[in-house]
Image (cartoon, rainbow, N blue to C red):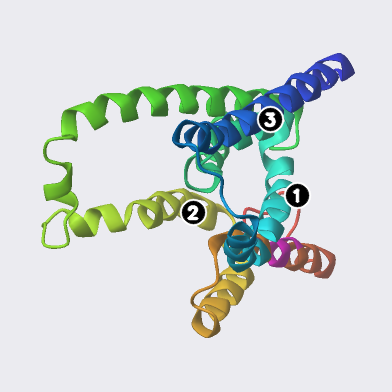
Amino acid sequence: MDNKYLNRTHTYGRIWMVVTLLVFLSVPTLICAHLGVRPELAKIAKGLSTVALVFYPTAVIEVLTYSPLLGTGGTYLGFVTGNITNLKMPVALASMDSAKVDPNSDEGEVISTISIAVSSIVTTVIIAVFVLLFRPILKDITADGSPFAPAFQQVTPALFGALCASYLAKHWKISILPIAVCCAVLIFAGKMGIGILIPIGIAVSLLGAHIMYKKGWVGQNDNG
């Protein structure tokens, strides 16, 4: 990948990350200014203390985990637009798989960036359209007693299940260990957040694949 492209991507990516952060912070700031109130720092610290130990390390881990897969442009786009785990990551991986390119290649960088950009635009348009269309009946179809309620609770498992099935079929040997470890983690720590579970699965996958490769159980041209 050309250094000029990477340098410009990092420059514009950092700018938009800062702009996005300022926009996020401006909402509560403007609300407080309009209402003439000021939050107490002690209460803010108390609220942060309950989530900081989980979300702050997770935020760092996600950057380290997702960046090699999404590429430079895809990483900035994904973290600015959000919903990486549920949407941006599956879209990028599915696009690169369809194009038969590796995530850490120049082609993968381009495919990942384009797919995440298109996904962000399409998602925004679809959400805007369907929010307006379904607003009158949204509460009824998502209520606990609604026959459609179970479907809304299974969107993420269905998305990752469909994406995972193709990879398991191609690389079933190296998938056994991470699946077993993740299942064991969920059995003994069922409330563990997905932001922690995914890096654990990735680390186990890398370690297991490396060991199996060294042992000769899988090879470079082995689909298992």
Q: What secondary structure do most residues of the magenta stretch adopt?
A: helix
Q: Position of residue 177 (x, y in %)?
A: 63, 72
Q: Residue at x 61, y 75 (%)?
A: 181
State the residue position of label 1. 64
Q: Secondary structure at mark 2?
A: helix
Q: Residue at x 66, y 37 (%)?
A: 70
Q: Secondary structure at mark 1?
A: helix
Query: What is the magenta range?
Result: 202-206
Foreground: 144 or 180? 144
In what quadrant of the picture does the N terminus appear? top right
Q: Residue at x 82, y 70 (%)?
A: 215
Kind of residue at disc 2: Cys
Instruction: Give the quarter of the image for residue 199.
Output: bottom right
Q: Residues within 10 Å of mark 2 (few under 14, many from 20)?
A: some
In what quadrant of the picture does the C terminus appear? bottom right
- Residue 125 appears in view: yes
Question: Which dot marks residue 164?
Answer: 2
Residue that lies at the very extreme toward the bottom in this rendered image: 188
Q: Position of residue 148 (x, y in %)?
A: 15, 53
Q: Residues within 10 Å of mark 1 (few under 14, many from 20)?
A: few
State the residue position of label 3. 17
Relative height, residue 132 to residue 50 (above, below)? above
Q: CA distance from mark 2 to mark 3?
A: 30 Å
Question: Which dot marks residue 77?
Answer: none
- Residue 174 appears in view: no
Relative height, residue 75 to residue 198 (above, below)? above
Query: Is residue 154 left or right of 190 when viewed as pictured?
Result: left
Kind of residue at disc 1: Leu
Q: Secondary structure at mark 3?
A: helix
